[in-house]
Image (cartoon, rainbow, N blue to C red):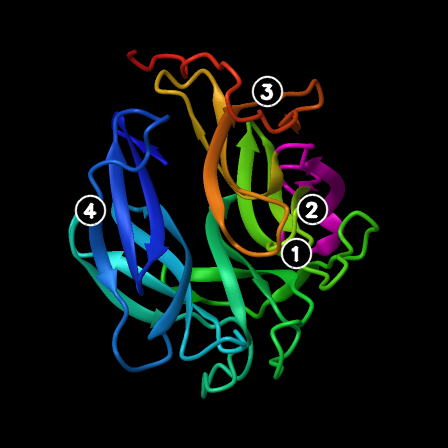
Amino acid sequence: MRHEGAYYYVEAGDRGIDVYRSERLTEPKRNGVRVWTAPDTGWNRTNVWAPELHLIDGRWYVYYAAGRSGPPFVAQRSGVLRSVDADPQGRYEDLGQLDTGGDPATRADDVWAIDLTVGRLNGQLYAVWSGWEANAATDRTPQHLYIATMSDPATIGGARVKLSSPVESWERGTELDLQEGPELLRNGDAVFLIYSTRESWLPDYRLGQLRLASAAADPLQPSSWTKTGPVFSRTASVFGVGHGGFTTSPDGTEPWIVYHAKVSTAPGWDRVIRMQPFTWRADGSPDFGTPAPTGQAMPQPSGQCR
């Protein structure tokens, strides 16, 4: 994300979370700081995945997934960290696990959840994530997109609603049907949820899109969203394109997608970070084009010093 003249990039690895700060969009992994390390015991002691950095009401929050065991990855849940001060690379406190389904009184049966993101719509803060209908003994369990209201940035305050399921032909995988990695994207009054679908470890991982009917539509109603896809897919040389995030060029004039792709068609999660600018269609929806091949000449982001 871009904030006060710098880009902040967050990543998980080695049971911890790192935040990087760079003035250059095209060099995101500079000046990295480990802001949190998983505890040795507890629900979030291992398998730290997919952190997201958000600035909400003057405080920084990192939403992440973690588990107590795996593989198989059947214990993944979503949690949240909050900055102690206004520094995104400073100290964070762990506020615990988020309520992603189950009995809110006991929290013992919270349902599997990853890739949680947050955003405000019409003044209300919402959480959107990828989850299972019920906990299972295998991680080859279909994943759906869920949404819920939040009473504050660390508390899911309403019951989860299943927003979307992988039912279209272009979403159906060869090994698993899933939707994950939801990201809110706005263009004026137009609101989109861009998500990943098909298997993340295979070359046909891709992006789909949900569009909110209007600025006044209820996000908790699945009928308020229209699905389109795929909106970003592999090419002959770029594979497994997914879990995209969005930012702008330094001068704010160009929207950019930052995503990961596989280094080969072989199954697995050997991936690299890629980025490129995109445009908006006449109807306000994003046009991501096709993944730019490695080695293709590309202009500097507008406003970035050479």
How many neighbours does mark 4 have within 10 angstroms: few (below 14), some (14-19), or many (20 or more)? many
- Which is in the foreground here, disc 1 or disc 4? 1
Label 1 vs label 4: CA separation?
A: 32 Å
Q: Which residue is mark 1?
A: 199
Which numbered tag is attached to residue 244? none
Q: Which residue is mark 4?
A: 89
Residue 215 within the segment the image draws in magenta = yes
Evaluate whether residue 152 shows in this view.
Answer: no
- Three-letter code, disc 4: Gln
Question: Mark 1–mark 2 contact, CB under 8 Å?
Answer: yes
Label 1 vs label 2: CA separation?
A: 7 Å
Vertical placement of residue 86 versus 5, above or below: below
Q: Which residue is mark 3?
A: 279
Horizontally, residue 61 falls left or right of residue 254, namely left
- x, y (%) of residue 223? 76, 51
Mark found first going from the N terminus, 3 or 2: 2
- Three-letter code, disc 2: Asp
Label 3 vs label 4: CA separation?
A: 31 Å
How many neighbours does mark 3 have within 10 angstroms: few (below 14), some (14-19), or many (20 or more)? some
Residue at the (68%, 20%) spot, across then down:
281
Mark found first going from the N terminus, 1 or 4: 4
How many neighbours does mark 1 have within 10 angstroms: few (below 14), some (14-19), or many (20 or more)? many
- x, y (%) of residue 188? 55, 26
Instruction: Say which quadrant the N terminus sits in.
Output: top left
Which stretch did the figure color magenta? 209-237
Residue at the (47%, 67%) spot, across then down:
157
- Three-letter code, disc 3: Thr
- x, y (%) of residue 47? 41, 68
